[in-house]
Amino acid sequence: MLRVARIFTARPRSGHAVSALIASPRPCIAPHSLDHKCHDTTKCTGDKDMGFSNLKSHAVTRGGACFSTATETVLVQARDSSLLASEIENAIDQQRFDDAWRAYDKHLHMDGLPRKSVLSKLITGFAATFEAHRLNQSYDVVDRAFQARPELLEKEALIYLSLLLARCALPDLAVNVVRKLVKIEAYPPVAAWSAIIAYMCQTATGSFLAADMVMEIGYLFQNNRVDPRKKSNRPLLAMKPNSFIFSIVLTASLLFGTTKKAEQLLELMPRIGVKPEASLLVVMARIYEKNGHKDEIQKLKRHVDEACGLSESEFRQYYDCLLSCHLKFGDLDSAVDMVLDMLKKGNNAKRSLEAAKAVLEAVESNKLYLPYEKKGPEISGSPNKPVSTDRQMQNYSSFFKDKSFARLELEARELHKLLSDKLQEQVGLVKSEHGVLHPTETMYAKLVKAFLEADKISALASFLVKASKEDSPVSVESSFVVQVINACISLGLLEQAHDLLDEMRFSGVRVGSSIYSSLLKAYCKEENHEDDITALLKDAQQAGIQLDSSCYEDLIQSRAHHNNTTGALHLFKEMKSSNIQKSVNREFEMLVQSCDNNEAALTAKLVEEVKSGHTVNHAIHDWNNVIHFFCKKRLMHDAHKALSKMRVLGHTPNAQTFHSLVTAYAAVGGKYVEVTDLWGEMKVLANSNSMKFDQELLDSLLYCFVRGGFFLRAMEVIELMEKCEMFIDKYKYKSLWLKYHRTLYKGKHVWHSVFGTSMVGNQCMDASIFDPSLGPSPSHYQARLSHEDRPALRM
């Protein structure tokens, strides 16, 4: 209720000003009359919760009556907290959010945070607007309540807020809400936070944070820390991540390229007792392929071949990453064996399919129908049904009624299906036809390019001969051999094209006249190829190849240009004796052109692949594998010896090399001086454009420097990440600093940092966690700080 009182202030003879401000629940002056008698002759104190700071209220009494001799009046208003709480609820119901926020602000100044039900309604009401401004306000309410009175926070309201934050592309706030839930031991069930994870994984930043969140929650269950037999652990066990959670995050990590963090998740799974599903085997194989772990992919092959329930697309993804790994390591023999095996199985399946079609036609002609021919109606919940992401978000009341969070789990599975479909689009080396795997033109192009770079022409010719026999092209002009030679001619690799043509002739493979004509014309455009032209003409005559008139004209002009009139005259007589007509010649050229247009996909792919200029250093992948093995076994001395040997052989370490070393030092603990040495080398390589930083590497470096107390180096990493516009999880590193270094500075200084304001207990501290020059440092940090300033590490 509203209380209004007129108070008179007086100036006593002593010169001291006395201000009378009465705002307590039991005022000594009645609201109806100023002549009301006081029940006590002592001073009446006021309430400081009215928002009037640094004011003291006194009532001067004389003869039992409250009176004053001043002429100035002060109007005092006091609000009842229950009325403000009702005003907040009414404003939320009527969607007057500005009024609700003002009432909430008044409630904070008068009586602190509102009660639990009002606070939950404020959080969910603001969140349900789907507006970024209101969502941030809702998060601010949660953050203030978490710092002051966490018991007022309701688990369902916070899950609802986190879900909407993730859906509205605010993954950093969504993950912070889940972290707060874990800290106050209001553990969200796995069905609930799986949907939060799924929405977060739709963006690159969200997938990075989702991987961190799964690792943080999974750490609680490592090495059987939680006893499942205790009834008190049931809420915590309900939060334990399952195989589906890992599948979502791993798929998103593959999609957005954070594969090294994904491998850390794979290492976490057996430590918390999570067994991978069959579909997760393919995702694991793709992660190992991206990180260059060929042996791990080979180990999975038996499990993939024996797994039940894998779809055609999943088999295609596995063999795609296995072929990619063979090419990455330069294992051309294994890649050739896989391609030829695919072609052989494709021919067998084609013959079987033709036989099956013949049987089916015979059955249909007799009007007999097999039982499996009849197809039933499509099930509404089929996994092949396209997924819609435009579904209307349920309000909080219906959300609250779903105690099992079944609808959220369904949404998570649909979002996971979307991620899997996007991931399948990245498969480019293997295609599927009628359930049979075939290599694509891109695969042929990459394989041929690898043979050409390794200068293995004989091996390439042998592969092309075998592939042409298995593929059985419609015409000679459309065979693999012709397309590869045409591509070499287009790229100016005339010597390689001539060598391939010789290999085909020695193998007894007949090649059409268009190849000879194209190669002869290419020789004519260049100089100093007279011997090659003569040898090629002799080979064409021996093979019975009839050249067209345009080829003869180019040869005659080339001989005349080099003043070889005798050779030009001989070619002219040969063309006349062959009786080649120009009209026929045009028809021949049109025929060749039509064949090229219809069957030159491999030629175009090979030309595009070679012109891209992308080269693979197979030795770097081998050395990275060796260093990763030692780091995984925590044999850091051997890892450094391998790194030194790698440098001596002239191979430059890349981001993956340093990431293995940095993460191993972080796992060992206490090896942060060695990380600073690696950081100095990384900066030198980055300045010379020999290495490119990625977010995973810089995030690992920042963790080591903050954990070890190397704050100057941490600031360098932060500056580089901000320059590259990479996301920094400030909440994580602020918590890490508060956990290990909160007692570093003892003085009452005000620190400012990139991580903002930190609340420690009831005390507000602006922590400049990365500037030790502002305050005194304990003796055990002096060695670290002096090591940071060594000239060898300065850039």
Image (tube, rainbow, N blue to C red):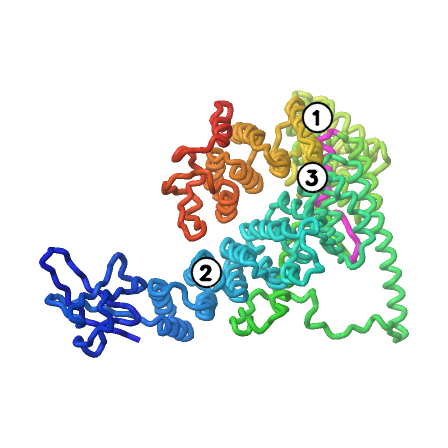
Q: Is residue 775 magenta?
A: no
Type of amino acid under label 1? Ala
Residue at position x 80%, y 43% in the image? 338
Q: Which residue is mark 2?
A: 149
Q: Which residue is mark 3?
A: 292
Give the percent coordinates (x, y) of residue 600: 70, 45
Type of amino acid under label 3? Gly
Residue at position x 29%, y 64% in the image? 47
Magenta region: 434-455
Type of amino acid under label 2? Arg
- Closer to us: mark 2 or mark 3? 2
Q: Secondary structure at mark 2?
A: loop
Give the percent coordinates (x, y) of residue 677: 56, 28
Left or right? Give the position of 668 relative to 39. right
Give the percent coordinates (x, y) of residue 366: 90, 74
Q: In which quadrant of the rendered view does residue 746 lie?
A: top left
- How far is disc 3 from disc 1 in space, using C-alphas? 57 Å
Q: Is residue 450 magenta?
A: yes
Give the percent coordinates (x, y) of residue 538: 80, 28
Q: Looking at the figure, which quarter contains the N terminus?
A: bottom left
